[in-house]
Amino acid sequence: MNIPKLAAEQKKHLGIIGCQISHSLSPIMHNTVIQTLNLPMVYGVMDVTEEMLPSLISSMRSLHFRGANVTIPYKQIIMKYLDEISEEAEKIGAVNTIVNNNGRLIGHNTDVWGVYLSLQPYANEIKNNHVIIFGAGGATKATVFAVAKFFSPRYISIVNRTAGKAHQIINHFSPQYRLTKFSHLETELDIQREIEVAALVINTTSVGMKPNIHAMPISPNIVLQKNQLVFDIVYNPVETSFLKLAKSVEARTIGGVEMLLGQGARAFELWTHQEFPMSAARAVLTQELTNPNGE
Ligand code: ATR
């Protein structure tokens, strides 16, 4: 599918803001649902450097712009340019959706809904159990928030390349969720010990995303467990190397497509006040991920 250009003046503009996002499927997903509902809108790609953010944001205040998604690596830095942050996004500390309300830009977080949809079938297994989360970025914050709020685990342990960011997340969420114990895992031995007792392991980093499909968020020395739940929020490729590793030990895997659909549906409803046609979106994503570029 060709992504329509953002020049069609009569249409309301939507898009995704990020860096190195040529493999994002949000444009195909949203343009498909826009066409399904026959809306006068168009969704484009805004692949920008950090220096370009202020001018991009001020141009978004034009009435032609209805809103945007925000992705790696801007989910946190974008917040300071917006006029208002929803209560939930404020609690999370990250924004993945912007709505232009007559020139006022409002930041929301719909990743939370994507995480909820992905994990809801396993709620009983997560409650009162251990969860290990790899990463400490904006997507991690929404994941920690959703897991702690909706599934009440006993422990959440964070593993991240940059230890300071893991500590920031723990300091941010510990006071909000007093019944959940938060910790930071650094050594391979600590990670392995926790993996052995964890009900759920989640990758929230971008590691393994196309084109770097052989990369993995965990050391090859770490052994995942049979029957353990392993969730990767990366959706492209549909089965990441991390999920392949999990399958090789008979862990149960959860891919990132539900997360993409869930966050996209909520964002779309905020922009259009119309119900998101989930089956049309799911069909186009399945087609793209199983047969990219018509190959
Ligand atoms: P987002 O806000 O979209 O989640 P982000 O804030 O840039 O994006 O966070 C990306 C996450 O992926 C971070 O946890 C990052 O680790 P650092 O905090 O150490 O930067 C992690 N990440 C990205 N590339 C990585 C890599 N090659 N190896 C390990 N972690 C990586």
Image (cartoon, rainbow, N blue to C red):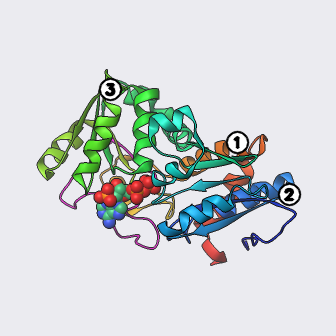
Observer-nearest of 280 and 60: 60
Tell me the residue at 67%/53% (across/down): 282
User: Disc 3 marks which residue?
Assistant: 175
Chief secondary structure of the magenta portion: loop
Left or right? Give the position of 275 relative to 294.
right
Q: Amino acid at mark 2?
A: Pro
- Quarter of the rendering occupied by the N terminus: bottom right
Residue 25 visible, this orientation:
no
Query: Mark 2 and mark 1 in contact (Cβ < 8 Å)?
Result: no
Give SS at disc 3. loop
Q: Amino acid at mark 1?
A: Leu
Per the model, the C-alpha gap separating discs 1 and 2 is: 16 Å
43 lies above or below 261: below
- Quarter of the rendering occupied by the C terminus: bottom right
Query: Mark 3 and mark 1 in contact (Cβ < 8 Å)?
Result: no
Left or right? Give the position of 205 relative to 154.
right
Tell me the residue at 17%/47% (across/down): 192
User: Disc 1 marks which residue?
Assistant: 270
In the image, is residue 230 part of the stretch drawn in magenta?
Answer: yes
Give the mark, 1 or 3, whose residue is nearer the N terminus.
3
Q: Amino acid at mark 3?
A: Pro
Q: Which residues are magenta?
A: 206-233
The image position of residue 210, as x and y in percent, is: 47, 69
Query: Mark 3 and mark 2 in contact (Cβ < 8 Å)?
Result: no
- Asked if the residue at label 1 sits under 8 Å from ligand 1, the reply is no
Observer-nearest of 257 and 207: 207
User: Disc 2 marks which residue?
Assistant: 40
